[in-house]
Image (cartoon, rainbow, N blue to C red):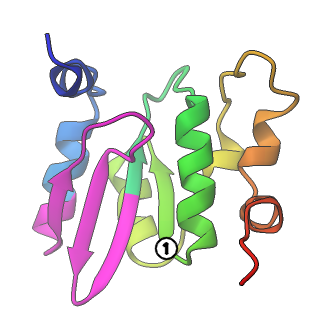
Amino acid sequence: MSRCNRYALARDANEGPIVERIRLAGWFVLRLNGAGLPDLLCVRGGRVVFIEVKAAKDGRMKPAQVELHAQLSAAGLTIAIATTPEEALAALDGTVVRTVQDVRAEKRRGATSVRALATAASYRSTNTRKP
């Protein structure tokens, strides 16, 4: 089984209804696959919003997801976590209900804090290049 297929099979059951509601609201939705990538890329009228779909119970973030969420936030992009269509629509309307800091994360071996990765400011301060 290829790496992409493994991620494609790991979709949460609530993703289908969320995608359907987002599309009914007039958004273009692309399902993303890959380690750390958010589940959905939503585009409408030049706006781009990333949505990570998590199961209502025990939906945890992988360390790669936490790090990428911080990078996307530091770049000024909107990224939210949704367990319901209502949360997803709120994120698309500009009211991000849940972010990576609101969800339990798995701890990477040897890491001191997964939460430190989740803060865009800490990512920006530790990973900026000087010209």
Q: Percent position (x, y) of residue 24?
A: 11, 66
Question: Residue 21: percent from the left, percent from the top?
Answer: 19, 57
Residue 125 at x, y = what percent?
83, 67
The residue identified by callout 1 is 77
In the displayed structure, 59 sits above or below 109; it is below
Asked whether the viewer can see residue 98, the reply is no
Q: Nearer the viewer, residue 56 or 39?
A: 39
Q: Which residues are magenta?
A: 22-50
Q: Is residue 27 magenta?
A: yes
Give the image location of residue 23, x and y in percent. Answer: 13, 63
Q: Is residue 88 left or right of residue 8?
A: right
The C terminus, quarter of image: bottom right
In this picture, is 21 found above or below 103? below
Marks counted in the figure total 1
Task: State whether residue 22 is above or below residue 117.
Answer: below
Quadrant containing the N terminus in the rendered view: top left
Q: Is residue 55 above or below residue 29?
A: above
Q: Is residue 124 magenta?
A: no
Give the image quarter of residue 6: top left
Of residues 98 and 11, the one nearer the viewer is 11
Residue sitting at x 56%, y 74% = 75
Side of 79 where 74 appears, left or right: right
Quarter of the view holding residue 130: bottom right
Q: Nearer the viewer, residue 7 or 12?
A: 7
Please name the residue shown 47% across and 29% down the image: 56
Q: Residue furthest top?
A: 1
The residue located at (25%, 38%) in the rendering is 33
SS under mark 1: loop
* Furthest residue in direction bottom, as rendered: 45
Question: What amino acid does circle 1 point to?
Answer: Leu
At horizontal 53% and vertical 64% (from top left) the residue drawn is 72
Residue 109 shows in the view: yes
